[in-house]
Image (tube, rainbow, N blue to C red):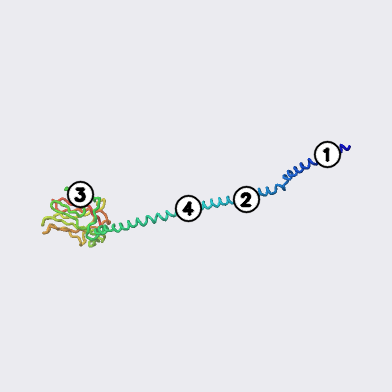
Amino acid sequence: MGERDHDDAGDAGRRAAGEGPAGAAHGPAGAADVPAADGPAGARRRRALLVAALVAAVAVVAVVLALTARDRGASAGPVTSGATPTVTAPTTTSPAVPSGTASSAPDAPPPGPATADPAAPGSVPPAADAPVPVPPLGDVAPVVGSGTAPVDAAGLTVAVTGVEAVRTQAEGVGEVAAPGVALTVEVRGPAGRRLDAAAVSAHAGAEGAPLRPAESDERNAPLPAQLPGDGVARGTYVFAAPAPGTPLALTVLLRLDVPPVVVQGLLAP
């Protein structure tokens, strides 16, 4: 009895001694599983996550701002570059070209007075290109001249020296004053040479329409019947005028043994 009690007491003492350290050993392990032991580490992790989230948010905002600024710069760039060529192109070309054009423009007017002179009274307009058809003047082919150039016909020289715009005088019965043209013809040859068949007629336009003579006009001065002592005779003939610029042809008969003369290349004044 006493021996068993001793053994039981020893076992109890051993258990107490053995469990004591074990319990002490289990104590910290159990304490590690308690949330209170995880508090500082969890707080640090939460702070680290919060800081990382803030840093990421700041980085995203910075990237968005950078992209927005770049888009604004890119959109503004074409406007500036597009406006620059528009302003520069006119500025570069306009000063250079007009200066050369302005200097050459005044040189063009000089030919103007030369074309105005033929329109003066008594002058001959420029020659027309297309010939005016005229009716046959007998069996002999005519001698054809152009403009104011002299034409030789069997020893006589014929030239038109004046084409003047006039207004016809209505002196005869049934005549009406109207625009007219006075044609002056000059004939040169031996003094005293007879001009037995002296006559002048005029035709106009592409159809060769005959111009009506203003017979009662006092400016009519036909060629004489023979050349005077200086061998130069002049005659003026007034006709009803066609439209200004209409091509004219003048036919001149002098003698039966002299071919007729046709002067082309005239224009109605």
| Depicted 142 relative to depicted 11: above or below | below
From the image, tell me which residue sits under label 2: 51
Please, what is the three-letter code of the amino acid marked with disc 1? Answer: Gly
Answer yes or no: is residue 261 visible. yes
Please, what is the three-letter code of the amino acid marked with disc 4? Answer: Gly
Question: In this rendering, which labeled residue sits more in front, label 4 or label 2?
Answer: 2
From the image, tell me which residue sits under label 1: 10
Please, what is the three-letter code of the amino acid marked with disc 3? Answer: Pro
Q: Residues within 10 Å of mark 1 (few under 14, many from 20)?
A: few
Nearest to the observer: residue 205 or residue 21: 21
Answer yes or no: is residue 210 visible. no
Separation of residues labelled 4 and 3 (CA atoms): 83 Å
From the image, tell me which residue sits under label 3: 136
Question: In this rendering, which labeled residue sits more in front, label 1 or label 2?
Answer: 1
Separation of residues labelled 2 and 3 (CA atoms): 121 Å
Q: Are marks 2 and 3 in contact (CB under 8 Å)?
A: no
Residue 135 image position (x, y, % from top left) = 21, 50
Separation of residues labelled 1 and 3 (CA atoms): 176 Å
Nearest to the observer: residue 114 or residue 40: 40
Which one is earlier in the sequence, the residue at label 4 or at label 3? 4
- Relative to 140, 90 lies left or right: right
Q: Secondary structure at mark 4?
A: helix
- Relative to 108, 254 lies left or right: left
Residue 253 image position (x, y, % from top left) = 17, 53
Which one is earlier in the sequence, the residue at label 2 or at label 3? 2
Q: Secondary structure at mark 2?
A: helix
Residue 130 image position (x, y, % from top left) = 25, 50
From the image, tell me which residue sits under label 4: 77
